[in-house]
Image: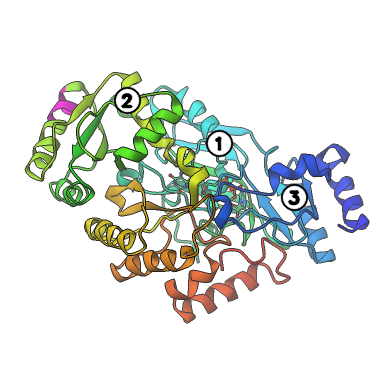
Amino acid sequence: MKDKVIDKLVSIAGEDWVIQDLDKIEGYLYDETPEPASPKAVEEVVVVKPKDSEEISAVMELANEQGVPVIPRGAGTGLCGAAIPTEPAIILSLERLNDIKDLDEDNLMVTCEAGVPLESLFEAVDETDHLFFPPHPGDEGAQVGGLVVENAGGARAVKYGVMRNYVKGMEVVLPTGEEVQLGGKVLKNNTGYDLMHLLMGSEGTLGIITEVTLRLYPEAKETATLLVPFENRHDAMSAVPEVLKEGHVPLALEYVERKLIEESAEHLGKSWPAEEGEAFLILIITGKNEEEIFDKSETIVEVFTENGALEPLFAQRRKEQESILDIRSNIYTALEEETTDILDVTVPPAEVGNLMDEIEDLAEEYNTNIPVYGHAADGNVHPHIMNVNGEAPEYFEDLKDEIYETALDLGGVITGEHGIGETRIKNLPMALSEEERVLMGKIKEVFDPNGVLNPGKAV
Ligand SMILES: Cc1cc2nc3c(=O)[nH]c(=O)nc-3n(C[C@H](O)[C@H](O)[C@H](O)COP(=O)(O)OP(=O)(O)OC[C@H]3O[C@@H](n4cnc5c(N)ncnc54)[C@H](O)[C@@H]3O)c2cc1C
């Protein structure tokens, strides 16, 4: 990195917040993409940790002047290499923007800086004792800004939707350094094109989010977790649309398999409570009192039983529920070392059974095991392509393409929540028409005429 750039960064953020030592920048070079699928990071980077929008603006002005790429960095929990520097760059970490500025109970909104971790946001909202922030992507270390630009989903999207549904306002530093305020604490806004929604899912390529206003909801008084075993994948997945069709929308409806969930439980030193069944649905049921929860659970169990379910387990004590969900949340961590890539294909909810059958056929064709789990009611599942002898198998790209083609043929998409980043860029032509890709390229040019903000990612 040119001395001139370093000197200017020091004058903007101060010496303590500009980092060049390799041992200190290593943690900023990678995200959580499994290593075999991950783009290789370059080490010619400098990490800057600005304290506010003003300093971020100055960094962007410098980047444009000197033609140096800038990569915004949240918590690095992304799963598509979107935050990985693949050419010499300034890594702009949002970690110092970690203030929860305003918890507005009258409007049911919270305004926080972009570097606030999801876990801290949950804690702050919990303190109100009656409000609740619904989205719950699996890694609570992820930052609010990262969650917004990845339009993250997670287990509770089935009832409440993805991040996009919660963002009402944001402050952004544009790639050319100007600061803009988009939206606000309003629930309806039809003033011109919705630039704010363009920023959501933009994977750090259209602007740096510095502050976000998010909508909150009243918290349900009671919850229970229902664990429903099935003999196999097909039965479990085919039962999901039957429950939804009956009008039951649980807070979460997750799919897991015995081998995976036991591996995850073992990883945590816990045990999986269900003794029978090979495939499981985990449902979180909410209600205003115990009676409502029991009624809802009873009717849901009836539908499942008619559709091949074995004896369900009902967990009501907080500890029991947390344990089941904790084991579910740690599947990725337990499998990560043996994984070549984790996919997040999404199909229309009623097609999820067909998707699972086709994945099973592909596993047979490639003579491999494809573990699958995920957000069943959203039609969003995570097939893992596994290492062979500790490395990516030589069929990795072919199998990945076939899984993508299968999802597309069923009317789905290649990524429902993790994004394109760098690892899926080469698959964009199969997923988007040329017209769509040209439009996206033009939008990028309008926001970022010099192509300095996270180049080579997402579009
Ligand atoms: C165990 C595990 C479970 C997960 N579960 C889910 C899940 O259920 N659902 C789901 O959707 N995802 C899930 N993820 C993926 C990940 O947590 C999300 O993609 C998350 O949104 C990334 O946030 P981050 O702060 O870590 O961003 P990073 O990984 O640091 O960055 C991701 C992208 O956002 C950009 N960026 C970050 N902050 C900003 C900002 N303030 N302004 C502009 N650009 C920015 C970066 O440049 C990069 O392009 C999971 C990941 C793990 C490891």
Q: Taking 15 as reference, is 412 left or right?
A: left
Q: CA distance from mark 1 to mark 3?
A: 22 Å
Q: Which residue is mark 2?
A: 321
Q: CA distance from mark 2 to mark 1?
A: 21 Å
Rendered location of residue 416, percent (x, y): 41, 57
Q: Count of labels shown?
A: 3
Q: Which residue is mark 1?
A: 141
Amino acid type for the residue under numbered disc 2 = Gln
Disc 3 element: helix
Label pair 1/3, CB-CB below 8 angstroms: no
N-term mark: 2 or 1 = 1
- Between 373 and 172, the one nearer to me in the picture: 373
Rendered location of residue 30, percent (x, y): 65, 49
N-term mark: 3 or 2 = 3
The answer as to whether callout 1 falls within 8 Å of ligand 1 is: yes
Amino acid type for the residue under numbered disc 3 = Ile
